[in-house]
Image: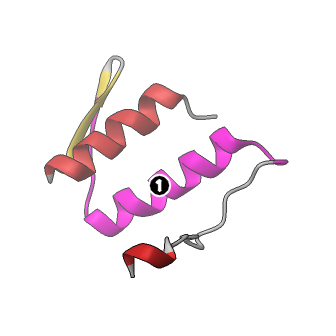
Amino acid sequence: MFTQSQADALERAIAEGVDEVKYEDRTVKYRSLADMLALLGRMRADLAGPNNARTDAIKASFDKEMC
């Protein structure tokens, strides 16, 4: 089970371009950005719960006046 603070820390590390994340009392060094993104996806799905599982699809809406 993951916590929201763990997901937030991993997301910040990805945004900052670093491969090391401190979670509470330990530090984890990731092998690659792909590993970090995969784990972040698992964390988000876990935090969403079984009834709110996210998909990888991106939904967008467009304002016709802006196009």
Task: Name the main secondary structure of what is drawn in magenta.
Answer: helix
Q: Which secondary structure lies at badge 1?
A: helix
Of all residues, the one furthest to the front in this rendering is 65
Q: Which residue is mark 1?
A: 39
Q: Quadrant of residue 60?
A: bottom right
Q: Where's the C terminus, which quadrant?
A: bottom left
Place of residue 22 in the rendered image (x, y in percent of width and height, measured from the top left): 27, 29
Place of residue 8 in the rendered image (x, y in percent of width and height, measured from the top left): 39, 35
Task: Assess whether residue 48 is covered by the magenta stretch.
Answer: yes
Q: Quadrant of residue 35?
A: bottom left
Tell whether 3 sits left or right of 40: right
The colour scheme of the drawn protein is secondary structure
Above/below status of 32 relative to 3: below
Above/below status of 19 relative to 38: above
Q: Where's the N terminus, which quadrant?
A: top right
Above/below status of 52 relative to 4: below
Extent of the magenta region: 27-51
**Residue drawn 77% across and 49% down?**
52
Tell whether 38 sits left or right of 33: right
**Residue drawn 50% across and 73% down?**
62
Place of residue 65 in the rendered image (x, y in percent of width and height, measured from the top left): 44, 75
Place of residue 54 in the rendered image (x, y in percent of width and height, measured from the top left): 67, 58
Of all residues, the one furthest to the top in this rendering is 25
Q: How many marks?
A: 1
